[in-house]
């Protein structure tokens, strides 16, 4: 039997449009709320630049970098990062794939630690608020990954996954 044939493909992972929409609307609401009510960014051009760069460029990039790093550490293969997704160039097992899906939790933890330190050092409120929003935005960022983990809950760890970025195919392990 051919390992990656259609007859061996048991599942295709995709984030449905309704979930993408919920994540996008929630993220946008939190960002707009932060912009208007917490940070007063309209009157603070420098903080606005930090806010936009952090949430729209650095956050998505670090998220994908986490996936790529863990995939690379576990399999020795390279991943390709493009904006808002990460493509694995060679198959990995479902067990390895689960760890790559969990990896962006590191970003949430990192924001959490920075937040704790900022509060502890009694830093300016705007920095504390910005980092707290970072925690929330990073949490929204992992919703799609957790949805895929949920879909994989009954799949054998030894089965194989080919991640094409926006979708991933799961194949039976025939060896
Ligand atoms: Zn992800």
Image: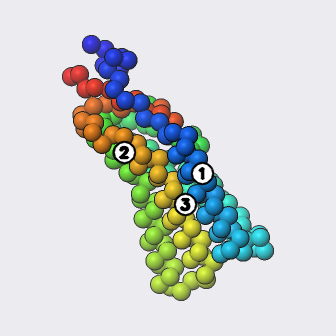
- The quarter holding residue 77 reads top left
Which comes before the other along the chain, label 1 or label 2? 1
Q: Is residue 42 above or below residue 163?
A: below
Disc 1 C-beta below 8 A from ligand 1: no
Residue 29 figure quarter:
bottom right
Viewed as shown, does residue 49 lie left or right of 118?
right
What residue is at 27 percent from the left and 31 percent from the top?
159
Q: Which mark is residue 149?
A: 2
Residue 74 visible? The answer is no
Give the class, few, some or many, for how many residues have Cα within 10 Å of label 2's Cα (few <14, many ≥20). Answer: some
Q: Which mark is residue 24?
A: 1
Q: Residue at x 37, y 29 (%)?
A: 11
User: Residue at (28%, 26%) from the top-left corner?
Assistant: 172
Observer-nearest of 40 and 150? 150
* Mark 3 vs mark 2, CA separation in Å: 19 Å
| SS label for mark 2 | helix
Residue 134: horizontal and vertical position, in percent?
A: 55, 65
The local secondary structure at tag 1 comes to helix
Which secondary structure lies at badge 3? Answer: helix
The residue where tag 3 is placed is 137
How many angstroms separate mark 1 from mark 3 (CA)?
Answer: 10 Å
Nearer to the camera, 87 or 12 = 12
Q: Is residue 9 visible?
A: yes
Towards the viewer: 173 or 122: 173
């Amino acid at each position: 039997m051919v390992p990656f044939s259609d007859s061996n493909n048991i599942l295709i992972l995709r984030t449905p449009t309704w979930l993408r929409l919920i994540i996008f609307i929630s993220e946008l609401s939190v960002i707009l709320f932060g912009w208007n009510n917490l940070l007063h960014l309209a009157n603070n051009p420098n903080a606005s630049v930090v806010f936009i760069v952090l949430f729209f460029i650095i956050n998505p990039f670090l998220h994908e970098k986490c996936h790529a790093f863990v995939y690379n550490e576990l399999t020795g293969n390279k991943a390709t990062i493009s904006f808002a997704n990460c493509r694995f160039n060679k198959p990995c097992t479902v067990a390895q794939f689960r760890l790559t899906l969990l990896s962006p939790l590191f970003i949430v933890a990192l924001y959490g630690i920075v937040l704790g330190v900022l509060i502890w050092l009694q830093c300016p409120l705007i920095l504390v608020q910005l980092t707290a929003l970072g925690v929330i935005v990073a949490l929204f960022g992992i919703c799609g990954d957790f949805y895929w983990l949920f879909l994989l809950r009954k799949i054998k760890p030894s089965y194989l996954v080919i991640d094409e970025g926006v979708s991933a195919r799961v194949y039976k392990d025939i060896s």
